[in-house]
Amino acid sequence: MVRRGQLGLHFRRQHPVGPFVLDFYCADIKLGLEVDGPAHEEQRDYDKRRTIWLAKEGIRVLRFSTVDIETRPAAVLRSIAQAAPPSTA
């Protein structure tokens, strides 16, 4: 989703945070990215609880469907850039 250095941010893949693992995480701006495939339809409550826990730790989470990533990659990247503080994006 985000290649090394893309957007001027460094994201780690499959990064553990507390009891959870984020699909992508940028520690510099405390931003997590989650890629939601079909399995996430069945775990909405879990995802909601996890997002709340992460927010309490100061971590913002953006969620993107696999369909959006595949069909609208530029829009996904714009959303990520907009979530980053102005000095980093």
Image (tube, rainbow, N blue to C red):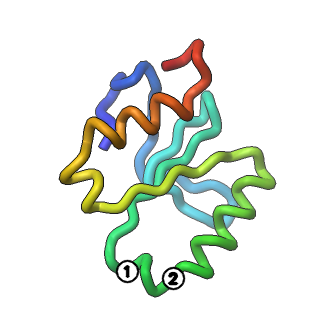
Residue at the top extreme of this rendering:
87
Residue 84 in percent (x, y) is at 56, 28
CA gap, disc 1 and disc 2: 7 Å
Residue at the left extreme of this rendering:
71
Residue topped by disc 2: 43
Q: Is residue 33 left or right of residue 30?
A: left
Residue 3, by quadrant, is top left
Give the residue drawn at x 54%, y 79%.
44
Residue at the right extreme of this rendering:
56
Give the residue drawn at x 29%, y 55%.
68
Callout 2 amino acid? Gln
Graded by Cα atoms within 10 Å as few (under 14), some (14 to 19) or many (20 or more), the crowding at tag 2 reads: few
Q: Is residue 42 left or right of residue 21?
A: left
Residue 51, by quadrant, is bottom right
Please tell me the numbered disc located at residue 39: 1
**Label 2 near label 1: C-beta < 8 Å?**
yes
19 relative to 13, above or below: below
